[in-house]
Amino acid sequence: MPAHPAIAPAEITGLVLAGGRGSRMGGVDKGLQTFNGEPLALHAVRRLGAQVGQAIINANRNLAAYEAFGIPVRADSLADYPGPLAGFLTGLAHCATPFLLTVPCDTPLFPLDLAARLSEALAAADAEIAMVSAPDSEGDGGPGLRPQPVFCLLRTSLRDSLQRFTDAGHRKVQAWTAQHRTVLVPFDRPGDSPEAFFNANTLAELQALQNR
């Protein structure tokens, strides 16, 4: 059997999602909170930038601070902080490559082989979306895997579908991805960090992550 063609990094645009309200952090701009001496979102930009051809940030506040990172900053086209899908839509609208890889700004330790593994799975399954599935560090404390819907590799051709979905008032990522050929990609190999997808929702969680 011929090998599935890998998706080259140059074919992927990376999108850092920093457009939320930060409501669980008391309304602060989450991506600009400090982690190991630098803004959270800058960690994400660096980790993602090493894996893709180009990167952009989705932000709705403090745009000048994000622009200082040296990559394009794009605000939501939808009003009132409607959530990650608005960021996805913004990324797809400004994406000149066949694929878009989304990551949130509050997960500074995501894997350095994220793009490669999602690309491999998407190509192998001939899927439209590849979504991370990672060990569940919350809930019952069990070792089960849980989808991480803001870590997605998307075909840029899905833009019209997402526009229709959000125009209809829908906001849940997995309700949209369920309409498409989506492959879940487990990140539970030996050597995978169990904290790779730990996201800091509160300032206390951010402090705890930094102290580990």
Image (cartoon, rainbow, N blue to C red):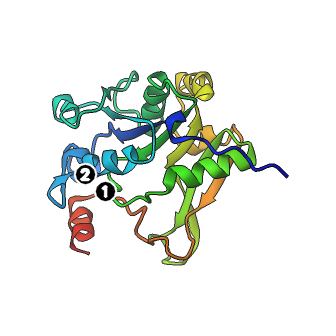
Q: How many labels, in total?
A: 2
| Location of residue 145 by image quarter | bottom right
Q: CA distance from mark 1 to mark 2?
A: 12 Å
Amino acid beneath label 2: Leu
The residue where tag 2 is placed is: 40
User: Percent position (x, y) of residue 35?
Assistant: 20, 58
Is residue 11 placed above or below 46 in the rendered structure? Answer: above
Residue drawn 47% across the image and 26% down it? 95
User: Percent position (x, y) of residue 21?
Assistant: 28, 40
Q: Find numbered disc 1 in the image and state the secondary structure of the residue it sits on.
A: loop
Say which of marks 1 and 2 sits in front: 2
Residue drawn 61% across the image and 28% down it? 158
Amino acid beneath label 1: Asn
Is residue 35 placed above or below 153 in the rendered structure? Answer: below
Q: Find numbered disc 2 in the image and state the secondary structure of the residue it sits on.
A: helix
Is residue 174 placed above or below 109 in the rendered structure? Answer: above
**33 or 188: which is nearer to us?**
188
User: Percent position (x, y) of residue 181?
Assistant: 71, 41
152 left or right, relative to 75? right
167 left or right, relative to 211? right
Q: Which residue is farthest right?
A: 1
Quadrant holding the C terminus: bottom left
Residue drawn 53% across the image and 64% down it? 134
**193 or 205: which is nearer to us?**
193
**208 or 52: which is nearer to us?**
52
The residue where tag 1 is placed is: 201
